[in-house]
Amino acid sequence: MNPKKALLILHSDKFLELAFPMTINPALLRYSSLLAVIILLITCSTCQRESGSGTKSTPLFDSIPVVVPVIPLIAEASGIADSKKIAGNLWVQEDSGNPPQLTLLKHNGAVQRTVYIKGAVNRDWEDIVLAGTDIYIGDVGDNNAVYPDYTFYKFPEPGLNIDTVTAFETIRFRYADGAHDAEAFLVEPSAKNIYIITKRDVPSRIFKLTAPFISGTIYTAEEVGRLSYTGVVSAALSADAKEIIIKTYLSLNYYKIGAGEKIETALQKAPAIIPYQIEPQGEAVCFSNDNNGYFTVSEKGFGSDVKLYFYKRN
């Protein structure tokens, strides 16, 4: 089975469907968890075979993660970022249908509290980035490709004494060629350019917004590259801006950024496949701030609970 044509996508509406045409009727999958799991395992197996290089070396990261339950459960986590102000915690955002807020989650899985973003709208928040001292939230989801424009919310990372964010910047944009569904983005640390990576395009496409940004302006995201795969649901840039992880439901694709190399150039290289334990509806990944590994967390999806995973660097 070719994973580019037969990728199993678990959407934010909690139903299972196929992103691309197949002979199987997607409606059947919405009522057949067993069939979904079978297709998932077949596709995953194919991806693993195709990604093998045939050479052996010391893996960059542990293949067995540290796993802790998220308590109380966060049902629809679609983006995470490791906090810089509040060490030992992650910021978690949930997607459409949830309040415009962030949840502070300890590395041990304990939910601390929520921070409300007053005046923001959660149309379909899909990823979060902490770049420098600022948080960016991407309202970039568009399952049916119907929206004329999209929004990033940007504000300084809240401290422990903040429960409501009342001031933020809005960065509005549209794509040069019409609507796209996206669930992943990266922010260049120095120039503050934003890279949006689409989900449903075959293959996934990379669009760029060039800083600086002025509130009230609608910018145009220009295509700067394409990946060799599809179904991207999250992206992460390491604290030293030398590594990238691009996440699909089935794998984590790892890239190194060379000295002076642009993000769009780095993403044209063949990725390495790094360890990932398949989650019910895993839509979030981030590096730890100390660059000692990376975290993943899933939406509840068709699972019974939610767990936080940490893969330590070797």
Image (cartoon, grey):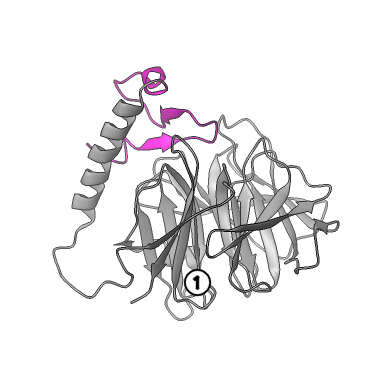
Name the main secondary structure of what is drawn in magenta: loop
The disc labelled 1 sits on which kind of residue? Ser
> Is any part of residue 186 visible from this angle?
no
Q: Position of residue 19 (x, y in %)?
A: 41, 32
47 w.r.t. 289: above or below: above
In the drawing, does residue 47 fall left or right of residue 308? left
Quarter of the C terminus within the rendering: bottom left
Q: Is residue 141 magenta?
A: no
The local secondary structure at tag 1 comes to: loop
**Residue 12 inside the magenta-drawn segment:** yes
Mark 1 neighbour class, 10 Å CA radius: few under 14, some 14 to 19, many 20 or more:
some
Magenta range is: 1-30
Q: Position of residue 77 (x, y in %)?
A: 56, 47
The structure residue drawn at horizontal position 35% and vertical position 18%, both measured from the top left corner, is 25
Quarter of the image where one finds residue 174? top right
Work out whether residue 143 or residue 302 is closer to the camera in this orientation and state it. Answer: 302
In this picture, residue 210 sits left or right of residue 73: right
Q: Position of residue 227 (x, y in %)?
A: 39, 53
Q: Quick one: which residue is furthest to the bottom in this view?
A: 259
Q: Quadrant of the N terminus?
A: top left
Residue ID at (43%, 53%): 247
Q: Which residue matches tag 1?
A: 238
Q: Foreground residue, 149 or 250?
A: 250
Asked if residue 205 is positioned above or below residue 144 in the image, the reply reads below
Residue at x 54%, y 47% (from the top left corner): 183
Residue 3 in sight here: yes
